[in-house]
Amino acid sequence: MTIGAAAVVSATGLALWIALAAETATGWGCLAIGVLAVLTLAVGLAAGWPSAIPVALALLGAEYAVFLGVDGIAVDARAPLVAAALLMTAELAYWSLELRAAIAEEAGAIARRVAFVTLLALLGMLLGAVMLALVDAAGGEGLWLEALGAAAALAALVLVLGLARRTA
């Protein structure tokens, strides 16, 4: 229950942060999407519905996309933090569902998992910051940069699918 609450707190913090960062008119729309995301996650975790987690994460991503699109932000330096928060929320949410089925935790398992999730989020944030620095250094224009971005997105997708297949 504590891990699920931490996932909801993480999602709430991200939703509020995005809504507060947006301009006033955009902020209310972002807040509405964020509230829907947090409610979806909370209800899904309480009911034990794993399918609610990706829906909630997609809503949080949509909130961020609305913020970027409506406020006209091309490259946001906060993107690595948003990615890390999404990753942390997802890991905590799925972990909370895993704990329902666990019979008994071995000694130190929770501490190791918390350290792993934290390290994963920090590495994701670092990778995002490096990619933003590369885009900034390259000037942010050109076909080769778009191709590099598409390749990076494909690599991220392959990595996520590989991790999902390994844990399934």
Image (tube, rainbow, N blue to C red):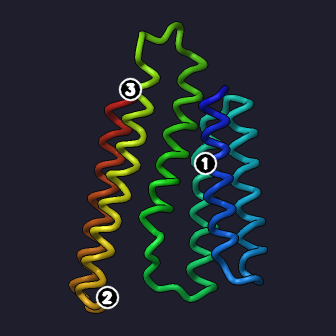
The vertical placement of 46 against 79, above or below, is: above
Residue that carries the numbered disc 3 in the rendered image: 112
Residue at x-position 38% and y-position 38%: 164
Residue 60 relative to residue 39: left or right: left
The amino acid type of the residue labelled 3 equals: Arg
- Front of the two marks 3 and 2: 3
The amino acid type of the residue labelled 2 equals: Gly
Question: Percent position (x, y) of residue 153?
Answer: 33, 65
N-terminal label among 1 and 2 = 1
Mark 1: few/some/many CA within 10 Å (<14, 14-19, 20+): many
The vertical placement of 12 against 2, above or below, is: below
Residue that carries the numbered disc 1 in the rendered image: 10
The vertical placement of 21 against 118, above or below, is: below
Which quarter of the rendering shows the C terminus?
Answer: top left
Residue 138 relative to residue 125: left or right: left
Considering depth in this image, is 59 or 125 the residue closer to the camera? 125
Residue that carries the numbered disc 2 in the rendered image: 140
Between the residue at mark 1 and the residue at mark 2, the CA separation in whole angstroms equals 31 Å
SS label for mark 1? helix
The amino acid type of the residue labelled 1 equals: Ser
Between the residue at mark 3 and the residue at mark 2, the CA separation in whole angstroms equals 39 Å
Considering depth in this image, is 24 or 99 the residue closer to the camera? 24
